Amino acid sequence: MPGQSLPIQTALMPAYYKDFHCIMGACQDNCCDDGWRIEFSKKDYLTIKRAPKSTEMEELMKLGMRRLREKEHDGMYAEFHVTDAGRCAFHTPEGLCRLQLECGEQCLPKVCRIYPRREVYTPAALEYSLSPSCEGVLSLLWDLTDGIDFIEEPLPPSKCKLALTKNPVETNFAAIRELWVDALQARGLPLPRRLTLLGLLTHQLQSLDWEDEAAVDHWLTVSGSLVRDPSALADQLGRMSGNRNMFLSNNLQLLIRQFKTLGPDLAEELLRVITDKQTLAEVDLDRVTINAGRYQESEAKLAELTGGSEHFFENLLVTITLFLSFPDVKTPEELWQSYVNLCNLYGFYRFAAVCAMDREISRERLFYVLVHVSRSLIHNPTQRSRLRNELFQNGSATLAHMAILVGG
C-alpha cells in the first residue's frame, strides 16, 4: 500500500527547549573558540558587508571574513577566519561577539543565530531540538531528573506544509518515534536493557512487510504493551548481556578512528585510562593490553558523580534521537542503521564519560568531554556513518553485538 500526504500543522519540541540560553564566556569550550569552521551563505555575507559599522570593524572584517571558492564548499559562500589558536576573529576575550555587539544579532549568519538549535520537518511535525555539543544544553539535561517531556504548538499557516510519505511505516513515524522515546524512558529497566528492548522491537518492525498496514498497526499495539510492561521479554533481554572486554576493545578502536576529529590531546588522555600506552603511535590493536580494572574504578567515580542515576544519559539519548531525527523509516535497512547509530553513540558516550572521571570527578569535566564527543560525532555525519558502516562491513551490526555495545 503506498504512503500518503500528511499535513504538518504543529511544532514539536522538548519542554526544556525554550529554557535554553547561551552561557557565553562561562562556557568551557565556546563554539566560537574551538576551531570550528563557521561557514555561511552569500545572503549572510552580504548582510554583514552592508551593515553600518565603525572603521575599526571594517578593518577587522578584512582579516576576519573571507569568501570561499565555489568548488571548495558547495552551498557555502564565505567563512569567518579562525586563528591559529582556533578562535573566531570576532570573538572577544570575554566570550562575546564583536559583530553582534556593534551590528546587532540580526547581522549574524544563520548558523551563529540558531546554534545549538535545529529545526526540521518530519512526517510528525516541524521539530525543534538542541544539540548535545553545547555545554548549556548538557546542563539542562543534567537537571531534568524526571526525564524529558514534549510540547506541541500549532504552526502559523505560513509554516504548514505536506509531508509526502512512501509507505505505511513512514506514515506512522510519529507513533514509532513516540515508541522509541517511551522505550528509552522506561525506567523499570536499566538503560542498557532499554536499548536492547528497543532493538528487539525495531528488528521486528524491520522484518515486517512494510506495505501491510494492518501488520504495522498490530506491531505498534503489541510493542506499546511491551514497553509499558517488558516482563514478557525478560528472558530474551537477560540472554543478551554485555561483554566488558569486547565493549572496551570496540570503543578503543572507535577512539583511535576519532583521533583527529576528537582532538589528539583528549584522545590520548582517554587512551591512557584504559591502556598502558601514552600515545596513539604506541598502540598495536593486536597486542595492546586493556586496563579493565582502571576503567572499573573510573566507572565507580561516574556513579558517585551521578548518584547512581541514569537520568542524564537517558536524557542524552532522547535528545540525540530528536536531534538526528531517529528512527529513519524510509526503508527497513535505514531503520536498522539508525538503531545501530544510536547504540554506537551511546556506547562511546558512556565510555568517554567513564574515562573522563579518571582525571577529575566533576560535572564540568564530564561536560567538557561529552561536548567534544558530540562535536566529533553528532556534527560530523561522515565520521558517524563511517563508524556505523564498519560495523556492517565486519558483520557486527547485529542485535547481539548492539547488546554488547550498550552493556559494557
Image: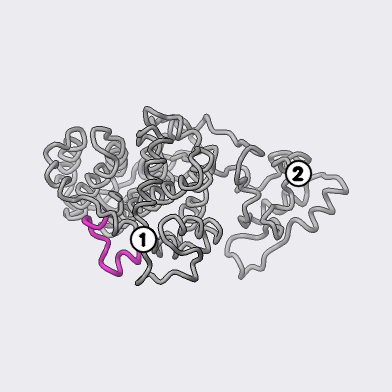
Mark 2 and mark 1 in contact (Cβ < 8 Å)?
Answer: no
Q: Nearer the viewer, residue 108 or 300?
A: 300
Residue 298 falls within the magenta-colored stretch: no
Q: Amino acid at mark 1?
A: Ile
Q: Nearer the viewer, residue 255 or 285?
A: 285
**Residue 257 is drawn in which quadrant?**
bottom left
Which label number is shown at residue 290? 1
**Residue 234 is drawn in which quadrant?**
top left
Disc 1 secondary structure class: loop
How packed mark 2 is, by other alpha carbons closer than 10 Å (few <14, some 14-19, many 20 or more), is some
Point out residue 38 in the picture as x, y percentages from the top left corner: 63, 54
Q: Is residue 93 above or below residue 67?
A: above
Residue drawn at the location 51% of the way across and 65% of the way down:
279
Q: Is residue 277 above or below residue 364?
A: below
Q: Which residues are magenta?
A: 389-402
Predominant SS of the magenta segment: helix
Residue 394 falls within the magenta-colored stretch: yes
Disc 2 secondary structure class: helix
Q: Is residue 370 above or below residue 385?
A: above
Q: Amino acid at mark 2?
A: Arg
Mark 1 and mark 2 lie on one chain; the one further toward the N terminus is 2
Point out residue 27 in the picture as x, y percentages from the top left corner: 61, 40
* Circle nearer the viewer, 1 or 2: 1
Total residue callouts? 2
Q: Nearer the viewer, residue 314 or 341?
A: 314
Q: Which residue is mark 2?
A: 98
How packed mark 1 is, by other alpha carbons closer than 10 Å (few <14, some 14-19, many 20 or more), is many
Residue situated furthest right in the rendering: 55
Point out residue 256 in the picture as x, y percentages from the top left corner: 44, 64
